[in-house]
Image (cartoon, rainbow, N blue to C red):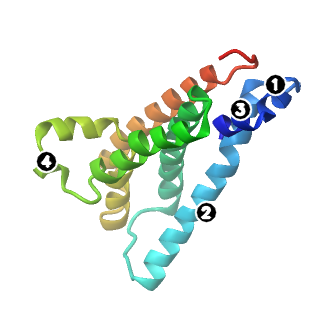
Amino acid sequence: VVAREWERGTMEAILVTPIRRFDLLLGKVLPYYVLGMLGMVLSVVVGMSLFDVPFRGSFTALFLLSSLFMLASMGFGLFVSAAIRSQFPAAQISILAGFLPALFLSGLLFDLGSTPRFIQILSYVVPARYFVAISHTLFMAGDVWSVLLPNALALAFMAVLFIALAYRKITKRLEG
């Protein structure tokens, strides 16, 4: 998102406006957060209504914990986009460092307990790992806070870390 602004030359126009870095960051995160949460709601509604997937947890917990996952994921993407000023390499890095590890190291496709120890350890840096555990718990067991809380804390830490890194990388100067 930020890399595209640099490539198109619109970042220079943004830099001369009186908006703060926080405003710029919020303007980049908020629309994608809303779209992501709408996608989550649609997925839950379709899963429950069309496929009769049971949901035993609270919708409030699902909303709050999904928000943490969304913020951690978007924070990572925004950090990459702010650090790399060219859109194509930023997209490639996001896919290689974000999407593929989320797909393979989250525990959604493969049981992490049956993977080599190195892969299990590596999976702890992937936000999707924690959200898969949260989703499994909310759908299958309900609000089991002894499972939800450690995963929520890990996601909150990642969200704060990545958003803080993105905030530091988004500058109000032309030089990077």
Q: Compute the Cα span from label 1 to label 4.
A: 47 Å
Identify the amino acid type marked 1: Leu
Mark 4 lies on a secondary structure that is: loop
Residue for badge 3: 6
Q: Which residue is mark 4?
A: 115
Query: What's under tag 4, amino acid-wise?
Result: Thr
- Seen from the viewer's position, the closer of residues 41 and 16 is 16
Amino acid type assigned to the residue bearing label 2 in the image: Leu
Q: Could you tell me residue 148's position as x and y percent?
A: 36, 48
Q: Which residue is mark 2?
A: 38
Q: Residue at x 53, y 33 (%)?
A: 80
Q: Is residue 8 visible?
A: yes
Q: Earlier in the sequence, mark 2 or mark 1?
A: 1
**First in sequence: mark 4 vs mark 3:** 3
The nearer-to-camera label among 4 and 3 is 3
| Mark nearer the N terminus (4 vs 2) | 2
Looking at the image, which residue is at 61% across and 34% down? 86
Residue 163: x and y in percent read 57, 31
* Quarter assignment of residue 168: top right
